[in-house]
Image: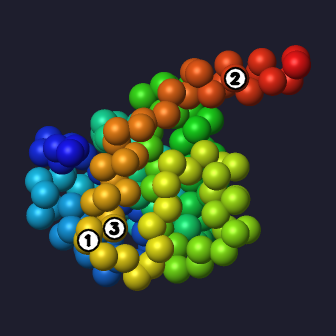
Amino acid sequence: MTSFANRRVLVVDDNAHARAFLAQILGAVEVSVVQAATGAEALMILKTVQVDAVISDMFMRPMDGIALTRAIRASDKPEIAGLPVIMASAQASREVVHGGVVAGVTGFIAKPFSPAAVLKRLAIALEHRPDPAAEVANSQASTYL
């Protein structure tokens, strides 16, 4: 079982109530929460605050969760590019999930979500943190095969 103590998660959602609900769930298991109301704000925070994962709403404006995930994956800093990104969305259609996977999302939680679902998805994401260098090497290698 993953220990959440001493972990820090960036919660990104344009809805203050959703951010507060996630902060309450995470705080109950001793996760430190940093909040951002926009994708742009999240990217600024990531430049100065070390976090262990990002939980982002899918549909925000002007930068949605997919664009935020792409920006995180495109970072030249491995500690940012490799962050687990969990996408939260009330829409879990095949197209939405596929778009997230293509962008590099680590996992999804469907809204409305339960505290157990959030913590389970976070535990899985933290245990299987992606290695961006390996992903880039694999994608480059596949272009030559």
Q: Secondary structure at mark 2?
A: helix
Q: In the rendering, which numbered label is found on residue 37?
A: none
Q: Quadrant of the N terminus?
A: top left
Label 2 and label 1: CA atoms lie apart by 35 Å
Mark 2 = which residue?
138
Q: Residue type at mark 1: give it.
A: Pro
Residue 99 at least partly seen: yes
Labelled pair 2, 1 in contact (Cβ < 8 Å): no
Q: Quadrant of residue 73?
A: top right
Q: Residue type at mark 2: give it.
A: Asn
Q: Residue at x 18, y 70 (%)?
A: 24
Q: Residue at x 28, y 60 (%)?
A: 119
Q: Residue type at mark 3: give it.
A: Ala
Residue 44 at least partly seen: no
Q: Quadrant of the C terminus?
A: top right
- Percent across and percent down for residue 143 are 86, 24
- Percent across and percent down for residue 76 are 56, 26
Labelled pair 3, 2 in contact (Cβ < 8 Å): no
Labelled pair 3, 1 in contact (Cβ < 8 Å): yes
- Above or below residue 126? Residue 142 is above
Q: Residue at x 51, y 27 (%)?
A: 131
Label 1 Cα neighbours within 10 Å, binned few <14 / some 14-19 / many ≥20: few
Mark 3 = which residue?
117
- Percent across and percent down for residue 106 are 51, 48
For residue 56, side relative to residue 74 (left or right): left
Q: Secondary structure at mark 1?
A: helix
